[in-house]
Amino acid sequence: MCQQIGHRHSIFCALPPHLLLEVVRNGEAEDREAALRTLSIDNTQRNLRGIRLAAPVNQALVATVSALGTAQGGRQRTIYDTHNTEILPGDVIRTEGAPPTDDEVANEAYDGLGHTYDYYLNMLGRNSLDGQGGPLHAVVHFGENYDNAFWDSTYMVFGDGLLMDRLTELTVAAHELTHGVTEVEAQLVYQRQSGALNESVSDVFGSVVKQYANDRQDAGQADWLVGEGIWRNDIDGVALRSMSNPGSAYDDPLIGKDPQPGHMDDFVNTLEDNGGVHINSGIPNRAFYLVATGIGGFAGDRAARIWYATLRDNRLSIRAGFEEFGLLTYINAWNLFPEGEEAAIVKDAWAQVGIVISQ
Amino acid sequence: MRIQFRTEGGIAGLRRKVAIDTDEKSITVGSADRTIATEELPAEEANELERLIEVADFFDLSATSAPPTRAADYQQYTISVTTPSRSHEARLTDPIENPRVRELVNHLNHLWEKRIEAHLASRRRDTS
């Protein structure tokens, strides 16, 4: 947040948000301006010495992009089929604007790409994963009985599953695509806490895209399940993960019990899974759930904007831990909603999962 | 020949295990730190496995592959093979590009899947 404003660089960097607000209300003109800039209340989207701010959606941009259709810069989806091999990307089976095919899995992937693109554009003003209208690719029928979906940095890749039978479910699709956004904006290293944050950000936007597709569902009504219905019928599980109640998604001797913690006291130290990136993501997941339900309304609006601003905040280091991320969500909540309760709700949410924000 | 195979990572962090002894003709499959089944390994499966290990030049594979830098939710596989004269461990990541190594991993997955399906079928019978 620190910005060089003549000789006043250091003092404005050091002031916490509530004091900056005081200066905005009662300070001298020059000081007010400096404090305002430091608080980043300015609504134009700009790059201040490399500090990018989340701005309210530029409606003109949304209109222009929507009108582009299949022209470059608009929504451009391509679905591929690897026919149960692992040779990427496979054959093109559906392109943007083409009608549904006989392949339900391919159609679900196509729709998942569409909902994800639409959410990012309409709610956050972001044109595709790279922010520049880049194409969206999904690959289906990867491998044999492949119980997984992954992001390979170009393609979103889905297996058919054996113990899983709904890998193209919307939250999974949006989760994978969001890895593409995180890669561009934050490059959170996929290990340990920064990796768990990377995973959590994908779960957050995965869930929010599903709620967006459900008519901008209220946070209090949403199920907060990632990969709901993903397990086949004879496996005892409702989802891959629960953001509201980490650790409750499944419990079956064949796959074990959902290992996610919901509080720092239960943080899992392990070398597996790149240091437990899919496990400890439960903690920031629950924090977001608490923020979203605390603020109320559609989570993809205010709560998600705070998270999106944090993701794009240049102060977020690529190896950030939960504490650093939490602090930046608090600061960005202040930036975005200086008059409201959002920042307090954010601080409280992190406290409830065991992360104390000292500000 | 003793073979150990495990998977980790992926969207669900599933941890699968297969332990095989081709001399004793035994296979044990597990999931999430729990043993699911131990049984006799048919000779054709044992022979096929040894053939695939040979064809994949397993003992010359590098011990680790660099993890993908910008990918996420990929699975990782660890295969270790021990004979009286040598032993080797290789760690691999999706997608496996070498087709012969891919075939070996597929075969190990099939060995696991077959026992898991049998286990699920008997579980259904027991509860019906």
Image (cartoon, helix red, strand yellow):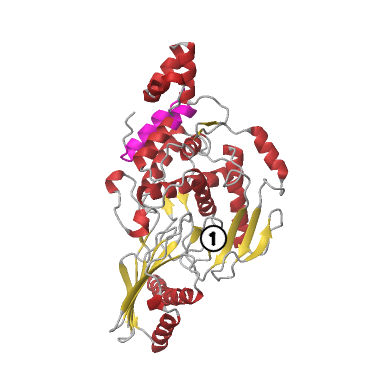
Query: Which of A303 and B22 lies nearest the eye of the viewer?
Result: B22
Residue A122 among those drawn in magenta: no
Q: Nearer the viewer, residue A318 or A222?
A: A318
Q: Residue furthest front?
A: A7
Label 1: chain letter:
A
Q: Is residue A344 magenta?
A: yes
- Left/right of residue B24 with respect to residue A242 in the rendered view: left
Residue A180 is at least partly visible in this image: yes
x, y percent for residue A180? 52, 50
* Crowd band around label 1 with a 10 angstrom C-alpha radius: few (<14), some (14–19), many (20+): many
Location of residue A119 (image quadrant): top right
Query: What secondary structure prevails in the magenta region?
Result: helix
Q: Which residues are magenta?
A: A332-355
Task: Name the residue: 48% across, 21% down.
Answer: A36
Q: Which of the 4 image quarters holds residue B34?
A: bottom left
Q: Position of residue B73 (x, y in %)?
A: 45, 57
